[in-house]
Image (cartoon, helix red, strand yellow):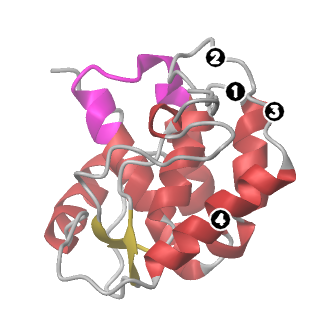
Amino acid sequence: MAGTSTTEFPPTPDAADPDLDHGWWAELRGALDVLAAVATEREAVRTLWMRRSFPLFLGVDAPHRIERVTGHADLHWANLTGTPLTIMDWERWGSVPAGFDAGLLHAYSLRIPAVAARVRAEFAHVLDTPAGRVGELAALCEMLQSVARGDYADIADALMDRAYMLTGRRPPVPPRH
């Protein structure tokens, strides 16, 4: 739109803290809460994938009970704009474990500790629940699977450290392909 400026956040390891205000974070939380309540049959993060991948990339079994919500399923800084908030890149949306979107944004934010801390604080209401921990583990598992393919080398150790914090077990070192 003419006269409207947006700020895009590059998903690079040297990206700066975007220093977003409380209103932006409230808008993001609200948008994800509204989305979570939308009914869908579309499964973005498959339960079968979780059952197979958790042992391989996290060193633990996937839980039997997985609370699901509707989510973006690819929430990272390249898919968000500053003021005004716009959430982009919707081709993957669907049913995800509760906490997956916040967990994925947190995982991508590990490059900038202050931003990672802000994501954790803003989404504590989800991430600090048993269901939210499962969603965060699913996000970490997905990222560690990508590490095994050669992506995210710059945050691989941080991803493994976070997985360890949540499970109490050191994830297997992802094999390089």
Q: Which residue is mark 1?
A: 112
**Quarter occupied by residue 121:** bottom right
**Residue at 40% of width from left, 44% of height from top?**
88
Residue type highlighted by circle 2: Ala
* Residues shaded magenta: 144-157
Measure the C-alpha gap from mark 2 to mark 1: 8 Å
Q: Looking at this rendering, what residue extends furthest in the front direction? A: 2
Task: List x then y, in percent, for residue 120.
Answer: 72, 54
**Marker disc for residue 29:** 4
Q: Which residue is mark 3?
A: 19
Q: Circle 1 — which element?
A: loop
Mark 1: few/some/many CA within 10 Å (<14, 14-19, 20+): some
**Residue at 58% of width from left, 40% of height from top?**
161
Q: Circle 3 — which element?
A: loop
Point out the tag, 2 or 4, that comes first from the N-terminus.
2
Q: Which residue is mark 2?
A: 15
